Amino acid sequence: VFFFFFAYAVDAAGNKSVHSEYCVILDSANFYLDAASADESADGSKTHPYVSFGQCLDTINKGRFARIRAKGIIKMPEGETSLLSNCMLLGTGETRILLSPSSCISVKSASFEISGCIIEKGAPVPGSGYAGYVIKLAHSVLTMNNCELACVFGKNGTAINADDSVINITAGSIAVSADNYAVSISADNSKTTIKDCLIASSADTAVNFSVHGGTFELRGTQCKAGGRMGRNGELFCAKTRMTGNTFTSEFQKTASAAVYSDDKTVFLENKDNDLRGY
C-alpha cells in the first residue's frame, strides 16, 4: 500500500512553512528473517527482521499469503510446525533450515514454496522421540527450487509425504537415510513433478519414490538407492512420464526392475532412461 504525506506548519499569524512531502510503502505480504539478528524489537521488517521461524508463524497463519526472505541458520521449533496459509520462503542459496529429530513441517490446505535453502533434519538421539517425516502435505501445494534436503531418521522415515496434493521440485536434491525403511517421496492421489534433481535413499529397505494414484513426472533426474533391498521407485495406478533419468542400484539384493509398476499404471512417456546396477 502506497501512502503519500503532505504537511506544513501554520503559526498564529497565519504564516505557512515550506511544504514537506513523505512517501512510504507498507507491504503486508513481505517479511524478513535473519537468524543472526539480535533485534529485540523484531517486527519482520527489513530493518527489524524476525530472528526465528517461530516469530514468523503467527504472521503466516493469520494472513492469506506471506513472503519470508530468510538468511542465516534457522532452527525450526520442536514438534510439528503447521502452515495453514500460503507461504513463500526465499533463501540466499546458503540459508540453512535445521530441524531437530522431533521437528517437522505440516502444510494443510495451503501452498508452501521454498527456494535457495539447505534443509537438514538431524539424527535422533537413542531413547528420544522423532518425527517420521520432514514435510507432510494434505490438500496442499509444495514447490521447491534450488534446494537441498538431507534427513537422517531412526527406524523409518519419509522426506516428503503428500496426500491429495501437488509436488513440484526443480534443480535440487533429496537425500534420506534410515535404519529399516527410507522413502524420499511418498505421494497418494497427488500430482508429482520432479526435474533436474538428485534423489538418494539408503536403508535396509530403500525406495526413492512411492506413488499411489495421481500423476508422476520425472525428467533429467539422477536416482540412487542402496541398502539390503528395495528399488528406485514403485508406481501403483499412476499416469507416468519418465525421460532422461539415471537409476542406480547399490543394493545387496538387486530388484529385477529399477521402477516397479502395477498393471494399472499407464506410461505416457518412458524413454532415454539409463539403468546402472540392474
Image (tube, grey):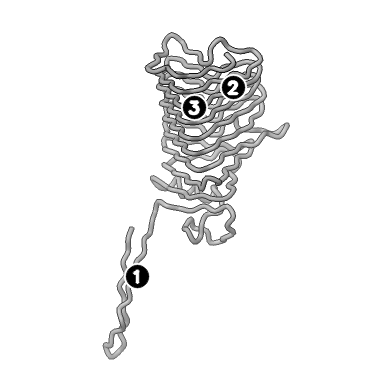
Give the residue at mark 2: 225
Percent coordinates x, y for residue 205 in the rendering: 62, 18
Q: Residues within 10 Å of mark 1 (few under 14, many from 20)?
A: few
* Element at label 1: strand
Q: Residues within 10 Å of mark 3 (few under 14, many from 20)?
A: many
CA separation, marks 2 and 3? 13 Å
- Image vertical order of residue 35 relative to residue 193, above or below: below
Side (left or right) of 38 relative to 90: right
- Of the residues shown, which amino acid type is indicated by label 2? Ala
- Of the residues shown, which amino acid type is indicated by label 3? Thr
Whichever of labels 2 and 1 marks the residue nearer the N terminus, that label is 1
165 vs 127, nearest the viewer: 165
The label nearer to you, 2 versus 1, is 2
Rendered image quadrant of residue 138: top left
Give the residue at mark 3: 221
Percent coordinates x, y for residue 208 in the rendering: 54, 23
Identify which residue is drawn at 46% across, 33% down. Answer: 169
Whichever of labels 1 and 3 marks the residue nearer the N terminus, that label is 1
- Image vertical order of residue 82 relative to residue 17, above or below: above
Give the residue at mark 1: 22
Side (left or right) of 165 relative to 120: left
The label nearer to you, 2 versus 3, is 3
Q: Are marks 1 and 3 in contact (CB under 8 Å)?
A: no
Identify which residue is drawn at 60% across, 38% down. Answer: 120
Percent coordinates x, y for residue 29 in the rendering: 40, 51
